[in-house]
Image (cartoon, grey):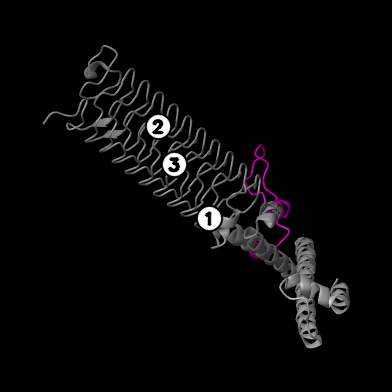
Amino acid sequence: MIIVGIVLAFFYGSWILKFLFLGRSEFSRAEILLYFSITAGGIVLLGMLIFGIQRLYFRRQSHRIQAQNDFNSRFKNASTLLYHEDTNLTLVGIYTLHQIAIEASSEVKKQRYVAVIKNLLCSFLRKNSEGFDAEEEKTNKEITRKKPEMVFQMVIDLLFRSSDTPIYNETRTHLTGIALNSLNFRKAQLRKAQLSRADLGRADLGRANLIEANLTGADLSETHLSGALLNRSDLSGANLNRANLHRVILHGANLSEANLKNANLKKASLNRANLNNANLSEANLIETHLNEVDLSEANLTKADLMGAKLSEANLSETNLSEANLSGVTLTNADLSRTNLRGTKLWFANLSGSKLKYTDFSQALIGENTDFTDTIHAGKTLEEIRGYTPPPQK
């Protein structure tokens, strides 16, 4: 194109000038050479500009393809290192995958890598630890791990506890049946996580976010959960024996048939939770909020509920024998057929509660206990089976 422009300007320069300058018919050779030089120079510059833009475009395309190939190559190599026999190389693979996820999170076309990497790391955790069979007796059963503890802890830290954790929040966490006992999950982001049948015994889950998590049948014995968020989580059938649930939030959670024997639930909030048929014997429930909970058929033998709030709670057929109910609030609660044998009911408020066929045998009921507007199936308090009024001064 440049050569054609130069030839036209050289041989037909005078005609071109006549066309451009309609008022003149004659041009000197010097003028023709001047205009020819200007025209040729302009054509050359235009050609160079077009060539430069085209070259830049192809270079960028080449770099993009190269970068994509490097990205895929890095991902493939890091994934391979995950299952390397050398622990150090495994750690390199984990960290490299995490860095790739960070890079991918900032580019729309590569964001799919974030979900792939999270699922890959969760799968790595599942494959390298052996959980327990919910139908087998777990007592004295050894947990088998194919990698050192620090490898598991690194994955947990990067996925759930680091400042970069939010990049993984859009992807669900699948750790069903995992054995991660005694590890550190403090402040971990595990919202809606699938942890059914997981072994998290003696792990630190303090202040962790487990809202709407699935922990059905999970082992959380002796686990530290103080300050954790478990709103609407499913812990049905879970083992929380001796677990620390101090100030935990369990609003609307499902704890039916869960084992909470000797658990510390002091100042916890379980409003509207389902604790049907749960075992809370000898549990610490001091100043715990249990308003509108379902504790029907639950076992609270020797539990300490001093100062607990149980307004409108369902305690029908619940075993509260020898429990401490001093200062407890049971307004409008259902205590039908509840076993209160040998309980302490000093300064308790049972106003408006249902006491149909409630067993008060050997209960220690203080003079300040409020029985206003209680329902007794047509009987007076003195006529209720086993009721013993406080001694007269």
Q: Which amino acid does label 3 sit on?
A: Leu
Q: What residue type is labelled 2?
A: Val
Whichever of labels 3 and 1 marks the residue nearer the N terminus, that label is 1
Q: In this view, does 284 lie to the left or right of 112?
A: left
- Residue 142 falls within the magenta-colored stretch: yes
Going by the picture, which residue comes out furthest to the top? Answer: 378
Indicate whether 42 appears above or below 103.
Answer: below
Task: Please name whichever residue, 112 or 5, is drawn nearer the observer in this view of the structure.
Answer: 5
Q: Is mark 2 on a helix, strand or loop?
A: loop
**Number of labelled discs?**
3
Using the image, tell me which numbered label, if any, was put on residue 250.
3
Q: Which of marks 1 and 2 is in front?
A: 1
Q: Can residue 109 be seen in this view?
A: yes
User: Where on the picture, by quarter, is residue 25?
Assistant: bottom right
Is the residue marked by circle 3 packed among few (<14), some (14-19), or many (20+) residues within 10 Å? many
User: Where on the picture, by quarter, is residue 84?
Assistant: bottom right
Residue marked by disc 1: 188
Indicate whether 108 appears above or below 382.
Answer: below
Percent x, y for residue 143? 67, 53
Using the image, tell me which numbered label, if any, was put on residue 68.
none
- Give me the C-alpha separation between circle 3 and circle 1: 17 Å
Q: Which residue is drawn at 51% across and 54% down?
A: 205
Residue marked by disc 2: 293
Q: What residue type is labelled 1?
A: Ala
Q: Can residue 184 be seen in this view?
A: no
Q: Is mark 3 on a helix, strand or loop?
A: loop
Whichever of labels 2 and 3 marks the residue nearer the N terminus, that label is 3
Task: Please name whichever residue, 193 or 147, is drawn nearer the observer in this view of the structure.
Answer: 193
Whichever of labels 1 and 2 marks the residue nearer the N terminus, that label is 1
Q: Give the range drawn in magenta.
A: 122-150
- Give me the C-alpha separation between circle 2 and circle 3: 11 Å
